[in-house]
Amino acid sequence: MRRSMLVIDLNDIGEVLRDLSQILAYPTGDLQRALKNLSELKALGVEKLVLKGRTYIGRYGVLGKGCTSIVILGVLKDGGKVALKIRRVDADRRSLRDEAEKLKMANKVGVGPKLMGYTNDLLVMEYVEGYPIIQLVKEEREIIKKVVKEVIAQCRKLDEIGLVHLELSRPKGHVIIRKGDYKPYIIDFETVSVRSSKTNVTQVISYLFFGKGFLQKRIREVFNLEESKLSLLQQALKRYKKQRDEEAYQKILQILYAQD
């Protein structure tokens, strides 16, 4: 039977070890790998695991399950909540260290959840309790404007350090809006490049303003972007992708926020 939530003290695993190994060493459940990950989690300051979420592995929920990793909620010794990314046994990459290094770069310019520690197989990050950007459609006009402006600003910061997040052309699961203060977080830095010809700014604006979904329609409405302005924006994006300088970036902002 599925459990809505289970809190596990890492110093008192008890009878749940076998079930827990299915998560810590997914998908094989290898006990030695699970025990290694448990030891590393303790060394990184994690005291408890909280198994909850809409995605299930066996009887227990997790925050997320991808092709290379599982994400679960953890609690540090000081009571702080963290997101724990655990490399899958069958992952097509041998380590999470490259992702950790890219996230550290992003953190230096104030982007992404704060990285708190890592090993080859684990990332410990700030836990962001919120909702995916696709749900922004339900918010008030001023909140939408605020969030979109901040997302674009974060993308500009990543462009300035040459770090390109390759999933921002479809950021549904890669931008989270934090509950309470509506701060956006760009997450999942495993598909990040320092060599790509793409830019973060053009990717995210193309998605937010030129798509055909309910969110995009609402954003165009909020920003009062008619066809003539959309055409100007498209031209400005082409210029930005080519030049990537501050002047080209400010031209984009001028078009978007001309009436503010």
Image: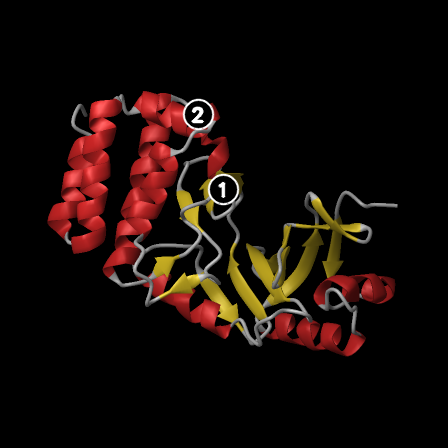
- Judge whether 13 appears above or below 156 on screen: below
Q: Which residue sits furthest left?
A: 247
Asked where in the image residue 230 lies, by quadrant, the reply is top left
Asked where in the image residue 137 lies, by quadrant, the reply is top left
Q: Residue at x 44, y 52 (%)?
A: 167
Task: Report x, y in % for residue 46.
Answer: 61, 65
Taking the image as shown, residue 212 lies to the left or right of residue 247, namely right
- Judge whether 148 appears above or below 126 on screen: above
Task: Report x, y in % for residue 128.
Answer: 50, 48
Task: Report x, y in % for residue 197.
Answer: 30, 60
Taking the image as shown, residue 119 lies to the left or right of residue 227, namely right
> Identity of the amino acid at label 2?
Glu
Of marks 1 and 2, which one's residue comes earlier in the chain? Answer: 2
Q: Nearer the viewer, residue 8 or 56?
A: 56
Asked where in the image residue 157 lies, by quadrant, the reply is bottom left
Q: Which mark is residue 172?
A: 1
Q: Is residue 256 visible?
A: no
Give the number of marks. Answer: 2
Q: Nearer the viewer, residue 174 or 229?
A: 229
- Residue identifier under label 2: 139
Q: CA distance from mark 1 to mark 2?
A: 16 Å
Q: Which mark is residue 259?
A: none
| Colouring scheme applied when the structure was drawn | secondary structure
> Identity of the amino acid at label 1?
Lys
Does dot 2 land on a helix, a strand or a loop?
Answer: loop
